[in-house]
Image (cartoon, coloured by chain):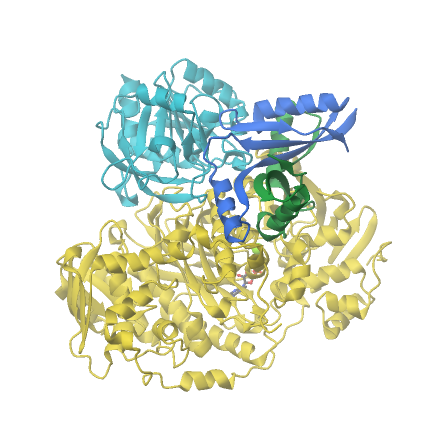
Chain colours: A cyan, B yellow, C blue, D green
Amino acid sequence: MKFGIVTFPGSNCDYDAYRAVVDSLGEAAVYLWHKNHDLQGSDVVILPGGFSYGDYLRAGAIARFSPVMHEVAEHARRGGPVLGICNGFQIACEAGLLPGALLRNESLRFVSAPIAVRVENANTLFTSGYADGQRIVLPIAHGDGRFTADDATLDEIEGSGRIVFRYVDDAGEATAAGNPNGSSRNIAGIINDGGNVIGMMPHPERALDRLLGSDDGLALFESMLARVAA
Amino acid sequence: MANVNPRPGDPAITPVLVAEHGLTPGEYEKLVAMLGRMPTFTELGIVSALWSEHCSYKHSRNLLKTLPTTAPWVLQGPGENAGVISIGDGLAVAFKIESHNHPSAVDPYQGAATGVGGILRDVFTMGARPVAMLNSLRFGSLESARGRYLFGGVVKGIGDYGNCVGIPTVGGEIVFDDAYEGNPLVNAMCVGLMHKEDLIRAKAEGVGNPIIAVGARTGRDGIHGASFASEDLSEASDAKRPRVQVGDPFTEKLLLEASLELIRSGHIVAIQDMGAAGLTSSSAEMAERGDVGVTIDVACVPVREKGMTPYEILLSESQERMLVVAHRGRESEVRAILAKWDLAAAVIGEVIAEPVYRVTEGATVVAEFPGSRLVTDCPRYSPESREDPEVAALRAADVSGIAPLPDEIDPAWTLLTLLSSPTIASKAWAYRQYDSTVRTNTVVGPGGDAAVLRIRGTNKAIALKTDCNGRYTYLDPRVGGRIAVAEAARNVACTGARPLAITNCLNFGNPRRPEVFHQLKEAIAGIGEACIALSTPVTGGNVSLYNESPRGAVYPTPVIGMVGLIDSLEHITRSTFGTAGDSIVLIGDTGDELGGSEYLALVHGVVAGAPPACDLKRERAAIDALLDAIASGHVASAHDCSDGGLAVALAECCIGDQSNPTGLDVHLGDLGDVSPRGALFGESQGRFVVSSPAPASVMRVAERYGVPARVIGSVRPAEDGFHIKAGESELDSDVASLAAAYHAAIPALMSSERLWSNAARQPALVNA
Amino acid sequence: MTVFRVGVHITPRRGLLDPQGKAVEGALHSLGFPGVSDVHVGRYVVIETRAADAGAAADSVRGMCERLLANPVTEDFEIETAAPT
Amino acid sequence: MTVFRVGVHITPRRGLLDPQGKAVEGALHSLGFPGVSDVHVGRYVVIETRAADAGAAADSVRGMCERLLANPVTEDFEIETAAPT
Ligand SMILES: Nc1ncnc2c1ncn2[C@@H]1O[C@H](COP(=O)(O)OP(=O)(O)O)[C@@H](O)[C@H]1O
Ligand SMILES: [Mg+2]
């Protein structure tokens, strides 16, 4: 299976995503240059973290106009899997691949820490390797992670099981204490109605090795492998 | 030599103008002698920048020459943009520390951000990919609005810049002390990794090779930043406000990628950051290193504003710019690489055979200097040095007689007081704003003793730390210099790493004052001694002088940035206790050494006494013993004793990891002639707190190295509490109170209700 | 064609949490501005653009807002009159 | 006393680098707005405050800018007319 990892100017987790795919999964990966109209036959597209265009104006606002995003949108429309992580989530929202928007953290400060999230829907392309309600620990590192949408949209994604991850506290509850950025309904990750585009603020690609603190991200990549390969 | 005439509109060269450029009458004479004529305004500007303290090291060069700089693993010592050491497997580590104190005092956010940007460029211009950032920060009290403004702004500036470029900020140190009230210190360190064969030096070579300006356009910002960094902070600094430069980390990220690609392409000969004194210093230094002449046409430099003069273009410190010497005929290849990263490039000059440094504006020569004398002829000073008798008296004071406060009856009160002082308390409020995990190599991030990064493709890791105790250095500069190195080494060793080499940032006051020059001289001597004893040569550094405000000089603060190597990932050791039941071993001797301690300063408001002795042979032996014990697999955790002494070190071992707090039961046994408070809060050097399931093995190793070690107690579950018996004294606390004191202190001080206003942007002018 | 300077206000949609506005409001109260009852922080973008007349300049800037400058999910925008530079 | 709404423009001082403005300018060019020659991005702060009259409201907001809202080192500010709400 081949993963295409988009490099926008200012992407800085493209390398981590590449290493995750190649070293931890043993799969093939290519960098997709933002100026090219070519996914190079990628089965899965990763929109990685970072600060595309410096996150100037709004996180993800400028990157979504990159030439390669035409092909990414086409790929998504055909049902191809897209994994948006952190800045990739922000870009996916700006591009309309996912609903809502990601605003400045409520604390107004960047937050970098290992954080607990609960798997809210283990029946997706990206989460079948987890159990429903499983509490996992992933690093976050962002300044604009407060997921926001109007109530109707929130009700709709919640009602259709499209909230995939929620921030939780030590007791596993989605409380304000467990919410690192003020996200509506503690949302850490959502999926589109086609079930093939996921956006999440935590970094699964940074959680693949116990040496670095957690390997709770492995199941996410393995879920994709299992489903896409099948 | 060409004919050089004043440019229409140039101000006349008067003694006042010369003085405004920071040149002494003697220095001006030297300049005239070198030129054989009067300088033009442009030339005066060039020399004022290159002969500023910041660029020329005129007061420190003679002292720096005494530092040890060689070892078989040192590939590049001082003299380049960054030092480079080999770590085996064909890999090398480039690293350097630099100050951005004065810009951060004027605008903490931009000052700190651009400091990070500058040191990043110093590392990637060596051909190394930056893999980690550290910092070392000093502020006045967080009780003052200005202290909070500076601290908050600096932390945000460091975070926003490093996070955006995508380099993890993994460690550092932060100290709050009134000595820094008028003049904060902001030192940033960058560490990069490379294949040895990619090492490139900033040396212009090859007559006819083009000189290319790369990156951001040149604006009017930061003109004369280098000379600004070379004077005391005063009211007058306020009027120099436009000197603040705005950083653009996004462009920096593009520059980083493009530069590494350029270096690997083989199309270029040399590359250097346009940092302090901008185009002037980068071009002059590259020419001097290569022993060639250069000619630069300022009319070819891409500018941001219309009507910029040669003077302004040469001295601008606009950020995110590089100077490249390419192989002749490869200009279009160079341009293609830069265009890929949306970066502009302009050929602005050429390497020439004639030994001159020449600047033209179109066809007109606007500045010309003979050969490399511009750099090499710069004045050197070894001013008078004399210890301040007041400091000598403070050091001689007997502090053991200071009566304990009534509250100290309960040593738990003292411990809680220390744990909640911002200098000792958890710095998570700051480092949670730094992305510490990007690039997925961070094994131990901020919060531990030293940061640890794995080296992909090997079974190795590197350990990194910055350290200094300014109070010790104030009381005894030589001992303070030694301890800065020793403490950095101990921190690195606690993770299982062998200390390899250091970079240093010497933050001192005005060197023309004999008592300051004395501090500088002695501290450098102490650093040198420790580097020899610990086999950690100096590979580079930075000198920041004139750190003074109307309150006086800062504490002399020689910050050490150390790199160590861990041979095997299995040896990576953490600082916090892991398992209840493990024994606690204290390695090293405890004396009754309260002089210069955090305890005296915080609880008694006293800065006096001799700082703890630093016996370098013992330091070396203790480090060797610890590393051996770690390698033999018997060490569960290791932490060094520093600020706040043994009691604080033990508490940190219990509460440092919030997800796994532990308690302990410790009996210090017979204290001999050491007082209980000396045993608990004294800061004797050369000590480690180690937890181990096999303490006998640890002690056997220690014995082999002749290092004292004894079991002082055991790790307990957190519910069992925290108990230390020190002679007559019993320290009892529940673990949660210790943790609350330690973790809540800085967040409480920085709560949003305590925001600063614009008044806090003005430096407090004491005595003025 | 003339160069026009057009200012654009981009403000967080009412009803959405505006932590920046709240923080500024709190700070203003503690600085002794008790009369302050509401603060919102948005963006101010100033664009210089060539156009045939002020109306065309404003139209073109409207297009920029719709496509890039404002996020329709969370922000409103308002274009000031275009003035020749 | 009436409640006035006062808008404030806070802009990066001319001569200082405005990386945000530069990035937006680049993006607008590639989006097909070639006429754009200069972009600056600042903040727009809207304050509701009680005051005796519009002049007093503006004066009070000026004080807020000087004391808190604008960074005197890097920013300029401009107060719009105060309007009663
Ligand atoms: N305290 C020091 N110890 C050792 N070397 C130093 C020290 N300070 C400066 N140097 C060396 O002097 C050279 C010039 O430093 P610097 O002017 O800071 O370079 P740049 O401005 O290009 O960063 C560098 O090679 C640096 O490592
Ligand atoms: Mg340099």
User: Can the viewer see residue B433 in this picture?
Assistant: yes
Task: Spot the residue most to the front.
Answer: D1
Image quarter of the N terminus of chain A: top left
Horizontal side of residue B361 vs A104, given as left or right: right
Which residue shows up at 38% across the image and 44% down it?
A: A112
Residue C51 vs D19, above or below: the answer is: above
| Front residue (pair B479, D83) | D83
Relative to residue B690, is residue B311 drawn left or right? right
Residue at x-position 54% and y-position 72%: B553
**Residue sitting at x 61%, y 79%:** B383
Q: Is residue B547 above or below residue A90?
A: below
Quarter, ligand 1: bottom right
Q: Could you say which quadrant of the image residue B677 lies in? A: bottom left
The percent coordinates of residue A171 (x first, y second) are 22, 40
Q: Position of residue C77 (x, y in %)?
A: 59, 28
Quarter of the rendering containing residue B605: bottom left
